[in-house]
Amino acid sequence: MKSLPIGEVLKEYGYINEEQLQIALDAQKKDRSKRLGEHLIDLGFVSEQQMLEALSDKLAEPLVSLDNIDFDINAVKKIPEAMAQKYNVIGYAFNDNVLTVATSDPLNYYGLEDVRLVSGCRISVSLATKADIQIAIERYYSDVDTLNLVDDIDESTLPEVEEDLNLFDANEDDTPVVKLLNSLLIRGYNTSASDIHIEPFEEKLHVRMRIDGMLVDYLDLNKNIQAALIVRIKILSNMDIAEKRLPQDGHFMGVIDGVELNIRVSVIPTIFGEKIVMRYLDSNSTIDRLSTFGMTEENFNKMNHMMSMPHGIIYVTGPTGSGKTTTLYMILEKLAQGQINISTIEDPVERKLNRINQMQVNTMSGLTFDRGLRALMRQDPDVIMVGEIRDSETAKIAIRASITGHLVLSTLHTNDTVSSITRLKDMGVDLYLISASLVGVIAQRLVKKVCPYCNGENNSCEYCYGSGYLGRTVVYEILQIDDEIRQCISDINKHKEIKDMAIKSGKMITFDDSYRNIASMTLAENI
């Protein structure tokens, strides 16, 4: 079998001719770092898929799609990561001392022999594309690293957290708990998770990650890790480690793959200990600067008109994690191109913006939204952004600021555009102030996209983790305020008429309109 020449195999199956083979052989003489098959692919004479199909038939070894395989992590661990990278091979099943591996080069007998010797197992070979194997290596070896760390942590390695806190010094990165936390953060970042949940239960510590809006199980940790891990996170977040009965909030900075991240941390007490949620806030990433913010042209024109107003207030509404702050940042960056003074008060500052004065809420020192907003009013601002309207006092100050010659941007937690009016009324804001100040409302949602790799039909897909969805896109509902709508806002008896009136007058684009636009664009892409 060792004498099986790939060139002759491909000729036999009609994928290449003799002339092409000779060209590839000449290329190999000049560059011995690549095998003949790689040269044939690079020259465009054959595709990797064609080569693997021919080898699969000739060698009687299966050609597999790794996204359809449920990986056994113990099989992955049989091959060191460095060897997996060197030979582009990964184990995915282990039974009766037989290790089933996927490789893109089944003719590399020396590599497979190394795998056999190191693993101490008999080897069963399957074929897979190089790209699929690389994706699997990146995904599953990060899991292996985390599990190895968990295995290394036992009672003897854990500190007496009440007595020895020096172990959690930021400079001591070699301690097991520090490595474990770093591993969790890297894993979450690499899978594009928005949040990491560390949940205590009676016999275990459960870790889940929110990916594309869905919570995905990751791993279970021993209870003996709980105290040390929580203390580590609390110290990084500048929390009181002695306080275990009350909720706490904090944040810390970190760098992953050269990207500076602000990790927001929330801790609450439960019956089995403290639960922690860590949210990723990208401090320096490039904001999506699509010419229309990812909106339809009609939506963008309406929003652009609102942004051009010299004063008034614009609300961006939606549930938690729907991208409200990102939309506000895109608006601010567009406005910052002009000769104006822009100031913000946020909790926390999620991204650093050029030419914009950003202020961080600090409740410990007494810097609240309402107090910070009052201070900003004395800073000669043209545009003010309030991170969130949380209470009546902040709502009233923001509205008064908008009436007195400032453009104010802020967020509310409401289901749609019209309900923001009801929300402000419930906060105690007079209807005449709402009608006089309101310029427009932008409501948004993040909706999941069907996984393009499995079309939502594969429960074992490694790209979408079996959810059937991969990535999200934003949909908008935009309400533009005119004089007629202002009159309806002032009259509480006409609030039910606002939506119908806005739609008829062309001042509102609904979520249903946005969904239809997305569906039509998706259909056009697939034609």
Image (spheres, helix red, strand yellow):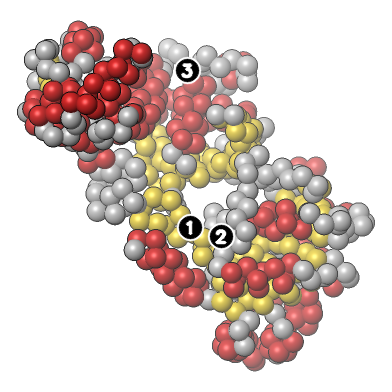
Circles 1 and 3 in contact, beta carbons < 8 Å = no
Indicate which label's residue lies in the foreground, 2 or 1. 2
Counting residues from the N terminus, which is met first, the one under dot 2 or under dot 1? 2
- Out of 212 and 266, give the one closest to the viewer: 212
Residue drawn 49% across and 36% down? 189
- Out of 246 and 348, give the one closest to the viewer: 348
In the rendered image, residue 281, in percent from the top left (x then y), is placed at 60, 42
Counting residues from the N terminus, which is met first, the one under dot 2 or under dot 3? 3
Quarter of the picture containing the C terminus is bottom left
Residue assigned mark 1? 473
Residue farthest toward the front in the current orientation of the protein: 19
Circles 2 and 1 in contact, beta carbons < 8 Å = yes
Indicate which label's residue lies in the foreground, 2 or 3. 2
Residue assigned mark 2? 294
Q: Secondary structure at mark 2?
A: loop
Quarter of the picture containing the N terminus is top left
